[in-house]
Image (tube, helix red, strand yellow):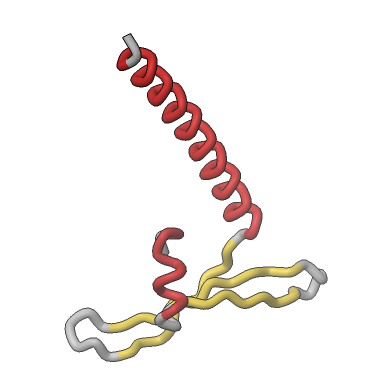
Amino acid sequence: MKVQDYVTLKGKSAVSFSKADDSDGATRYYLTKKVFDPTTGESKSDSKQEVQLDMYKSELESANADIASATARKEGLTKIIEDIEAL
């Protein structure tokens, strides 16, 4: 699943997360996705896979860094254009 599609898929009840504690007491997280036959549209068995919360946290940190970098670039470009147009 693409992260950017999550809100749409969740709204259609096509994906969900769940958690379970294993025998060692560790919490495990799972992503369940609805699966459909592309030809007939018939519902098939759901796909369930373990996911890592830390992976999503790391991806969010990376996205925030990208936003900060893009914002700084935008501010620099804006100032360059303002200075040139002020000549």
Extreme-bottom residue of the structure: 42
Instruction: Give the quadrant of the N terminus.
Output: bottom left
What is the x, y in percent for residue 7?
45, 69
Would you place residue 11 above or below residue 27 in this image?
below
In-front residue for pair 47/58: 58
Would you place residue 2 above or below residue 9 in this image?
above
Would you place residue 30 above or below residue 86 in this image?
below
Which residue is rendered at x = 64% and y = 59% of the image? 53
Name the quadrant containing residue 64: top right
What is the x, y in percent for residue 85?
31, 16
Left or right: where 87 falls relative to 6: left
Instruction: Give the quadrant of the C terminus.
Output: top left
Which residue is rendered at x = 81% and y = 69% of the image? 24
Numbered circles on residues, count: 0
Name the quadrant containing residue 34: bottom left
Extreme-front residue of the structure: 86
What is the x, y in percent for residue 51?
58, 63
In-front residue for pair 56/20: 56
Name the quadrant containing residue 82: top left
In-front residue for pair 44/86: 86
Which residue is rendered at x = 36% and y = 80% of the image? 35
Left or right: where 51 falls relative to 5: right
Extreme-right residue of the structure: 25
Which residue is rendered at x = 22% and y = 79% of the image? 38
Extreme-top residue of the structure: 87
What is the x, y in percent for residue 8?
40, 72
Would you place residue 84 above or below residue 18 in this image?
above
